[in-house]
Image: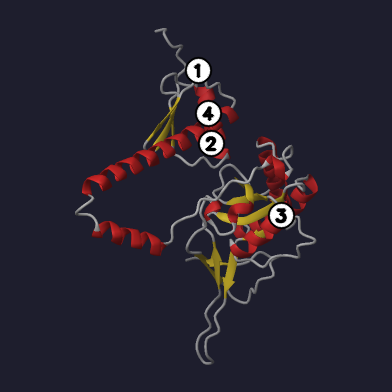
Amino acid sequence: MRPFLPPPFSILNTDFLMQIRFATPALPTDWSTLSASEGIVFSGDVRVSSRSKLRAKILVFRDVAALQRFWRLGLGRRKAPEDTVRAIVSDLSSIVTFHPPKGTPRRPPVWQIDPVYFCVAGFVLGHLSMDYITHESVHAAYAYARRVAGRKSWPDKEDPEEHVCYPAGLIAGAINQLFHRYRLYDRQSESDWPVQPKRRRKSAKLIQKNKQGAVASKGSHVDGESKLDRLRALLEFRRNYDNMRYHGMTLLLNAGISTSNCSFIPIPGAFEFGSRSPLSHAAAEKLRADIQSLSFPYPVDIQASDEIPGLK
């Protein structure tokens, strides 16, 4: 655990060094698993640079009420006044301070951070415009500057403003590009986003009760249960396979690659592109760049070759 000294523009107490600790559990990549996420119509990640591991989560909500509900229940953050907020950014860190009894040594405060996400930005349909994006990007830039704490080198780095202005411009550009890529500017009406029914998960008590019932009737229903298990496994495999095919087709189309001469084969543990008709090295590099720019949920194996099929 290394000491952390807040940057000059931070309002944190700098009487003595702080300690950094990763928050547990870490935030998931798929935020639809968090509470009150049913109002999210779009989710994506942006980075300040292609080499940076730190990300900002970008969320678009159906309406203001959905944003406020997720901020309170999904993130556990204090919500802002509903009549004024159409976009919001929250720094994904917290400070834990200790107050030991008198006469005992003071403990330095602990800065808890998520290992991947430095902030989250929430927007609302109907209000996706550059004024909101620019405003929230500045807030996100302050969160990023606090997180890297001067470890990032910018031109004119002696000027403290540059540690905010540079990431603010890059974050605003990345959000704008993300909204253009998925046509969010053209789909700002709630009717453009049909409500998807949320699949209810079984509670732990119900799962345990079902297990106990299955054990009790195991002797008389061995054959029936085995057939049912095989059917469930087959349906789950088909669901995963279709899901991978959907993600693969979407990725190819977004990359501008014709699916008529490029195949993709879902296999356990990886995603193969071009196994029947290998991509050229140039197309493969473009595809790798597109994969890095979005959250593709599967490992990818790309086969590239500049040879013309059928010729030696």
Farthest top residue in view? 311
Q: Which marked residue is nearer to the observer: mark 1 or mark 4?
A: 1
Q: Name the residue beneath numbered marker 2.
A: 291
Q: Secondary structure at mark 3?
A: helix
Q: Which residue lies at the image location 35% right of the left edge and 43% below the top edge?
A: 232
Tags 2 and 1 in contact by the CB under 8 Å rule? no
Return the disc, 1 or 3, that comes first in the chain's sequence. Answer: 3
Residue 143 appears in view: yes
Please name whichever residue, 53 or 188, is drawn nearer the observer in this view of the structure. Answer: 188
Q: Which marked residue is nearer to the observer: mark 3 or mark 2?
A: 2
Q: Position of residue 270 (x, y in %)?
A: 40, 36
Return the disc, 1 or 4, that comes first in the chain's sequence. Answer: 1
The residue under label 1 is which amino acid type?
Asn
Q: Is residue 307 left or right of residue 8?
A: left
Q: In the rendering, which numbered label is found on residue 122?
A: none
Q: Name the residue beneath numbered marker 3.
A: 164
The residue under label 3 is which amino acid type?
Val
The residue under label 4 is which amino acid type?
Glu
Q: How far apart are the two marked residues, 2 and 4, measured between alpha carbons? A: 10 Å
Q: How far apart are the two marked residues, 3 and 2, measured between alpha carbons? A: 28 Å
